[in-house]
Each structure stands twice: as C-alpha cells, then as structure tokens.
Image (cartoon, rainbow, N blue to C red):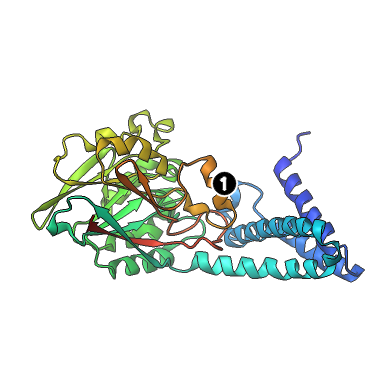
C-alpha cells in the first residue's frame, strides 16, 4: 500500500507541535490542546480537490494557522536551547500568538489592498509625460476564496485613482471561465484614460489561458501576447508592451515569452513600459531598451518568513530594482494564493508615476 505521504507528514508535524507546546501543562491541557490541533489537521486541505469544497476558506485558513504553529514552535525550541527555564512562559506565549497572528494575517489578506505610490525617474521624459500614472494590479487570484465582492471593491479603489493606464500583470484567476466569469465581471468597469492592459501569468495557463484571453477581451481589456500598443498622451508617445508568462511555452509552444519581439516595430523615441508576470523576464528585457518593467508573481513571499525563499526561484522579491538601465517594479500582489495570510507583507494596488530623472 502506498501511504499518503503529505497527510502523514502534516499529521506528524501537528503531533510535534502538541508534544512540544503541551508538555509543561496538566493532562486537561493535553486533551484540550490535542483536540484543537486534531480539528485543525482534519480541516486542512488534503489535496487540490479541496479548492472546490464549500469549506475551502476555512481549510486554507487552517493551513495558515498550521504554518504559524510550526514556525513559532521551532522558534521556541531554539530559544529554549539558551533559556531552558522558560518552558512554561514560552509555551504560553506561542499558544497565544498562533491564533492572534493568524487572525491578523487573515484580516490583512482579505481587506481591499491599500494604494502604494511609487515614482519612477525616467531620463529625458517628455514634459507631457511628467506625472503619467499607471495603476498596477497583480496576482489577484480570483478563485476559490476571492470572489466578486473582493473584485468589485478593488475596481472601485482603482477607479478612484484616475490613472492614465491600468495594468494587470498576470495571475488574475485560479479557475475556468465557466466557474469564475461572474466573479471577474466587475473588471469591465475599470476606468482609465487609455484603457486596461493585461498579460498572462502562470495561473492563467493552469486555468485555460485561451478561454481567459477571449473572456478578458470581451470585458474590454487589451491582452498583450508578446506585442505592444503605442499611446499618444498629449503629443508624447508611450509604448505599453506585454509578454506571455515566462513558463508559457510549457503549455503552448506558440506562447513562448519574447520581450524583444514584444517591442519590435515600436517607435524609438517613445517611453517603453513592459508588463511581464515574472520578475526574471527583466534579464532579457533590460538590453532591449525598456525604461520600466512591471511584474508580480512573487507576492513578496505573501507572509513572513516565506519572503526569504523567493530568491530560490526569482532574482528579485518585491519593490523597486534596477536592472542595467531599466527600472523593475515587483508588486507584492493585490490578492493572495492559498492561505488567506498577509502577515508582515501587505498586499497592494500600485500607483506608478513617471517623473523626470
């Protein structure tokens, strides 16, 4: 028989938390704490099918609580190596911290993302483009736990920015058009001077990218597949280019990401902005003459301390970076994926403003 290794490992880790945290207390505390951990283990998702369960939000919240339980228990064990007399107070502190931190992280994930203002200095920026604004959304992950009300509130906040362009840098959805069309419908109401531009992320390919490309175009968005548009802004030109996801060729050979091809034929004197889901596209984009790349994908790690592991897969984690002569801005994401958790790494709607260098 093949053992279900992941549930077995998760169960053993719950047992580790129980033994380490409950050992200093009376038997009744063992029973109460053990029951709470057993209930959390029972609630946790045991596979991908849980994403369609009506309890999905509770299940992924249980996973977030489990993550904090393991992290804080390990931290306590390290502290006890130096201060063994702290067994009881440290156990009490961790037992109190686990639900508190989970609750705070849940609230920060489920709220409408705050606006983060970022100024990008551009050499030789035409006067007509001083103050040109882009409202960036990324990694919204409309799906099992992020629904229409969340999307509508996000759209209302973006519309209040009165941006020149709205840019969505991938991972908009986690599910099929048939399942999520009702929830993404408010995107049709996004307003900006020059319209909404979007590129595919890896999760679009998990969710049926071609169907979503058609649906997003029906909603009025411009889906950029290794191509660009040139905007006339009070006589100055801005090139908005977009590439398919860095991994898209694994799903569709015709969608291989191509930053150079996306810029082909564009005017040389225009300010050039690239939308690319994954930050690592910057290494190929920077030599092509782009002034700015907007990306997402990393969620900034989503919640501490997972931000420290992002560099194992991406060269950049979050915020503003310089790659050669090109600026790169990586959004921490407007939604979340998996556990509804944003402790220490807030979500964002980003207002990018071009300013003269």
> In the image shown, does 270 or 150 lie closer to the viewer?
270
Left or right of residue 220, residue 10 in this image: right
Which image quadrant for residue 257?
top left
- The residue beneath circle 1 is 309
- In the rendered image, residue 84, in percent from the top left (x then y), is placed at 85, 61
> In the image shown, does 93 or 120 lie closer to the viewer?
120
In the rendered image of this protein, does residue 110 appear above or below residue 211?
below
Left or right of residue 165, residue 110 in this image: right
Q: Is residue 215 visible?
A: yes
Q: Quadrant of the N terminus?
A: top right
- In the rendered image, residue 225, in percent from the top left (x then y), is placed at 29, 39
Which image quadrant for residue 142?
bottom left
In the rendered image of this protein, does residue 231 appear above or below residue 145?
above
- In the rendered image, residue 200, in percent from the top left (x then y), is placed at 36, 44
Dot 1, crowdedness within 10 Å: few (<14), some or many (≥20)? few
Left or right of residue 11, residue 356 in this image: left
Rendered residue at 79%/66% (across/down): 91
Under tag 1, what secondary structure?
helix
Q: Is residue 31 visible?
A: no
> In the image shown, does 250 or 239 lie closer to the viewer?
239
In the rendered image of this protein, does residue 214 appear above or below residue 77?
above
> In the image shown, does 213 or 323 lie closer to the viewer?
323
Rendered residue at 34%/33% (across/down): 255
Q: Quadrant of the C terminus?
A: bottom left
Rendered residue at 28%/37% (across/down): 226
- In the rendered image, residue 247, in percent from the top left (x then y), is placed at 43, 35
Q: Residue furthest left?
A: 235
């Amino acid at each position: 028989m093949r053992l279900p290794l992941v549930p077995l490992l998760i169960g053993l880790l719950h047992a580790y938390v129980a033994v380490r945290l409950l050992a200093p207390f009376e038997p009744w505390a063992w029973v109460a704490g053990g029951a709470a951990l057993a209930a959390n283990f029972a609630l946790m998702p045991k596979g991908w099918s849980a994403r369609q369960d009506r309890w999905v939000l509770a299940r992924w919240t249980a996973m977030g609580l489990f993550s904090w339980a393991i992290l804080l228990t390990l931290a306590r064990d390290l502290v006890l190596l130096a201060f063994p007399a702290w067994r009881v107070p440290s156990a009490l502190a961790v037992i109190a911290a686990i639900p508190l931190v989970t609750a705070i992280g849940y609230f920060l994930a489920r709220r409408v993302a705050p606006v983060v203002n970022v100024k990008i200095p551009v050499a030789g920026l035409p006067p007509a483009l001083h103050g040109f604004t882009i409202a960036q959304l990324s990694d919204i992950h409309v799906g099992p736990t992020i629904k229409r009300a969340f999307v509508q509130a996000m759209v209302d906040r973006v519309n209040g920015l009165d941006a020149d362009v709205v840019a969505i840098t991938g991972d908009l959805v986690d599910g099929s058009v048939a399942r999520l069309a009702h929830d993404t419908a408010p995107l049709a109401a996004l307003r900006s001077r020059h319209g909404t531009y979007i590129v595919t992320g890896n999760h679009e390919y998990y969710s049926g990218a071609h169907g979503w490309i058609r649906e997003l175009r029906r909603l009025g968005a411009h889906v950029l597949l290794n191509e660009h548009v040139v905007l006339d802004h009070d006589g100055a030109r801005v090139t908005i280019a977009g590439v398919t996801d860095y991994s898209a060729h694994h799903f569709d050979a015709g969608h291989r990401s191509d930053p150079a091809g996306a810029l082909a034929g564009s005017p040389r004197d225009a300010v050039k902005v690239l939308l690319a889901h994954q930050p690592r596209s910057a290494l190929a984009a920077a030599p092509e003459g782009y002034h700015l790349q907007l990306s997402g994908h990393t969620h900034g790690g989503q919640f501490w301390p997972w931000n420290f592991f992002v560099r194992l897969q991406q060269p950049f984690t979050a915020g503003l970076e310089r790659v050669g002569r090109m600026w790169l801005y990586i959004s921490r994401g407007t939604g979340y994926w998996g556990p509804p958790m944003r402790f220490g790494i807030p979500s964002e709607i980003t207002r990018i403003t071009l300013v003269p260098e």
